[in-house]
């Protein structure tokens, strides 16, 4: 069954949605995006989504294509039109259609697009079995805090990871882990969660924000500091977080078993609490 998508004010079947070849998103990757998780037909973590979306727009000199209320209603309409129960809504805004010049055009109408997709979030089998990760070189630009649609470097890194039989790649710069190709990275040592502090070098993950909030509320120790691959190899546990996986355990990095090679106790505790948090938001 074909899905209904949103494009520039209209709801259309997915194969009827067309964008100009002169759209700056197509020509330059000049745009930003977001993903909102959906559980029980309800968007969760909406406030941090709006905050990060607005920040990304501001950082690249773009404005909202409509009011925030209208934007949220549009996303809700997509959920209802596609009868989405669990998964997410992908939303993207580009600077719009203009002659191909590197400088920003003036008074260009932005292109706004969104679509929904199904994905198992709460009962994800990988939450119990764990996933494998490999290290890859971080070749991205210097403003990784902006959720830009220019994702070629991440795609290359993800492909390298998949080629090696891994679920995810942890990007490494100067010997230090930055983040996953499409997730935030964590290790656990002596019952303490360790994750890199926020900066322009990583995306301010929404799941990261909620996870650290949950840890604080339940007296789980957290240190925001740099960690190396060697630190990761010798960690007691490791895990990742992302929009439609919440939290997943990492049982192997570069072929090296993490801990005893099974999901650890801190991860298990965090996952259970995050699931409950998400279900409460979805009521």
Image (spheres, rainbow, N blue to C red):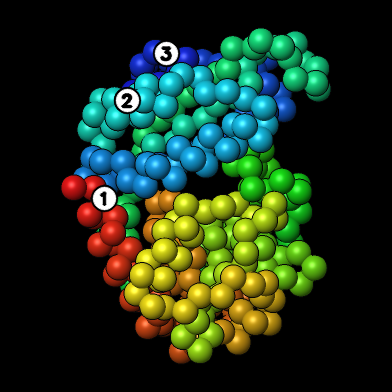
Q: Determine which residue is flagged by label 2.
A: 73
Asked which quadrant contains residue 122, the reply is: bottom left
Percent across and percent down for residue 69 are 36, 25
Q: Determine which residue is flagged by label 1.
A: 281
Q: Determine which residue is flagged by label 3.
A: 9
Q: Residue at x 60, y 87 (%)?
A: 234
Q: Earlier in the sequence, mark 3 or mark 2?
A: 3
User: Is residue 153 among the parts visible in the rendering?
Assistant: no
Other-residue count near label 3 (Cα within 10 Å), few / some / many at <14 / 14–19 / ≥20: few
**Image depth: mark 3 or mark 2 in front:** 2
Q: Is residue 238 above or below residue 4?
A: below
Q: Is residue 219 above or below residue 99?
A: below
> In the figure, is residue 116 to the left or right of 226?
left
> In the figure, is residue 33 to the left or right of 247?
right
Q: Is residue 270 above or below residue 81?
A: below
> In the figure, is residue 52 to the left or right of 274?
right
> In the figure, is residue 169 to the left or right of 10?
right
Q: Earlier in the sequence, mark 1 or mark 3?
A: 3
User: Is residue 207 among the parts visible in the rendering?
Assistant: yes
Percent across and percent down for residue 273 are 30, 68
Percent across and percent down for residue 129 are 37, 73
Spatial distance from mark 3 to mark 2, Cα to Cα?
Answer: 12 Å
Q: Residue at x 66, y 35 (%)?
A: 59
* Badge 2 vs badge 1, beta-carbon distance below 8 Å: no
Spatial distance from mark 2 to mark 1, Cα to Cα?
Answer: 17 Å
**Image depth: mark 1 or mark 3 in front:** 1
Q: Is residue 254 above or below residue 50?
A: below
Which element carries disc 1, helix, strand or loop? helix
Quarter of the rendering occupied by the N terminus: top left
Spatial distance from mark 1 to mark 3, Cα to Cα?
Answer: 28 Å
């Amino acid at each position: 069954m074909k899905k209904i998508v949103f494009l520039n004010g209209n709801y259309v079947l997915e194969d009827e949605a067309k964008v100009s070849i002169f759209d700056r998103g197509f020509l330059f990757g000049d745009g930003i995006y977001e993903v909102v998780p959906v559980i029980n037909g309800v968007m969760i973590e909406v406030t941090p989504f709006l905050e990060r979306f607005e920040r990304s727009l501001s950082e690249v000199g773009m404005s909202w294509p409509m009011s925030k209320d209208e934007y949220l209603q549009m996303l809700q309409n997509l959920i209802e039109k596609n009868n989405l129960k669990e998964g997410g809504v992908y939303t993207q805004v580009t600077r719009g259609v203009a002659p191909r010049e590197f400088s920003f055009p003036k008074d260009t109408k932005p292109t706004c697009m969104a679509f929904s997709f199904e994905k198992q979030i709460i009962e994800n089998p990988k939450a119990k079995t764990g996933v494998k990760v490999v290290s890859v070189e971080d070749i991205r630009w210097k403003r990784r805090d902006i959720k830009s649609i220019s994702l070629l470097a991440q795609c290359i890194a993800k492909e390298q990871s998949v080629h090696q039989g891994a679920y995810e790649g942890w990007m490494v710069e100067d010997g230090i882990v930055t983040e996953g190709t499409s997730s935030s990275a964590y290790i656990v040592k002596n019952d303490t969660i360790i994750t890199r502090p926020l900066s322009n070098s990583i995306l301010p993950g929404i799941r990261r924000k909620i996870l650290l909030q949950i840890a604080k509320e339940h007296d789980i120790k957290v240190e925001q500091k740099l960690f190396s691959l060697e630190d990761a190899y010798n960690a007691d546990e490791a895990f990742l977080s992302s929009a439609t996986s919440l939290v997943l355990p990492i049982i192997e990095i570069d072929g090296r078993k993490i801990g005893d090679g099974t999901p650890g106790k801190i991860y298990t505790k965090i996952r259970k609490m995050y699931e409950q948090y998400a279900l409460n938001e979805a009521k």
